[in-house]
Image (tube, rainbow, N blue to C red):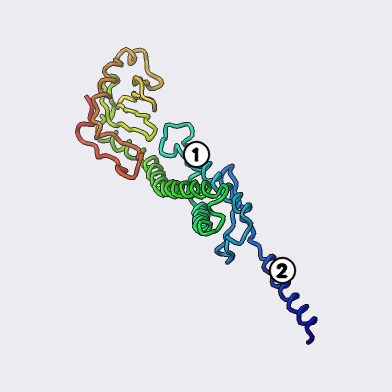
Amino acid sequence: MNFMSRKLWILGGMSLALGACAAKQVAPERYTLGLARAEYRDYARARVDVCDTEPQEVSAELASVNKLLTDFLSSTEQVKNPHSVDHGRAVELLQEASGSLGKVLDVYQANLTAVGKCGFAKSGAFPELTKQGSGLLEQSRARLGDATQLLAVQEAQQKWLAEAPQRKQTARQTWCAKNPEVGSTDLYYARKYADGRTEWLFCDGHIVQSGAKGGEPTLVSPEGLSAKDRRKVKPPRYLEAAQSYPAEEMDKQPTGLAGTSAPAHSSAAGGN
């Protein structure tokens, strides 16, 4: 092989090698959570050093994931506040995230660590992007941790609802006469829902109700009362009986992992 041929051979080999390196691209992965979308790349899985990639592309990628995590945290902020109008949507989004966002966070954490070792890490927008990304990453992991507790609470709440009719029936059989007299204000069962709504049930069919946001309790009479029976009803007596009912005897829907069991009714539940 003469000198010129050897030179061409070497140059050709170098071109092939450089071409191979240039052709080795990391395909972006698209992730959607609610209405938010982001693109990210798993450099570690592709065995590509992020420092050898285009900084502008990496910068856009970090900004994209940061935006998604910001939206996620904002949209799930009210997940622990059942009184908020945004609570339902926050719960839905957290449930959706619990099955998929963890993988994205793992890849993003690895990417942030790798970017920190690059020569361009201290230039342009990278310092702010990586700092923001680290904070969002930590907050998002904490928010995902709420999902496990949330699902357990929801399961306990559904169980409480399903079993409540039987508890109510048992209490009625225990504390009420077979033919209760209208106006007797015998109170046999009280329950409080997770949203704050409260009910006190009386043997003669009357119910005292209190709304989720509090306010003055109101008396609700059963349908079909005769004029004679209506004259027997003294609303203040029902309201007084409800207010005197022991809080520890109330059947409360779980609002957290603690205190998920229903109370055992004692003789105090017999009313007045």
Mark 2 is surrounded, within 10 Å at the Cα level, by few (under 14), some (14 to 19) or many (20 or more) other residues, namely few
The one of 240 and 134 positioned closer to us in this rendering: 134
Image x and y of residue 40, in percent: 59, 54
Instruction: Give the left or right position of residue 22, taking residue 59 as reference.
Output: right
The one of 36 and 1 positioned closer to us in this rendering: 1
Question: What separation in Å lies between label 2 and label 1 (alpha carbons)?
Answer: 44 Å
From the image, which quarter does the N terminus lie in? bottom right
Say what secondary structure mark 1 lies in: helix
Task: Identify residue type, mark 2.
Answer: Gly
Image x and y of residue 170, in percent: 29, 38
Mark 1 sits on what residue? 74
Extreme residue toward the front, this view: 3
Q: Residue 184 lies in what quarter of the image?
A: top left
The one of 119 and 33 positioned closer to us in this rendering: 119
Q: Residue 41 lies in what quarter of the image?
A: bottom right
Say what secondary structure mark 2 lies in: helix
The image's mark for residue 19 is 2
Task: Identify residue type, mark 1.
Answer: Ser
Note whether 209 is above or below 41 in the view shown.
Answer: above
Q: Is residue 61 visible?
A: yes
Query: Is tag 2's residue or tag 1's residue first in the polypeptide sequence?
Result: 2
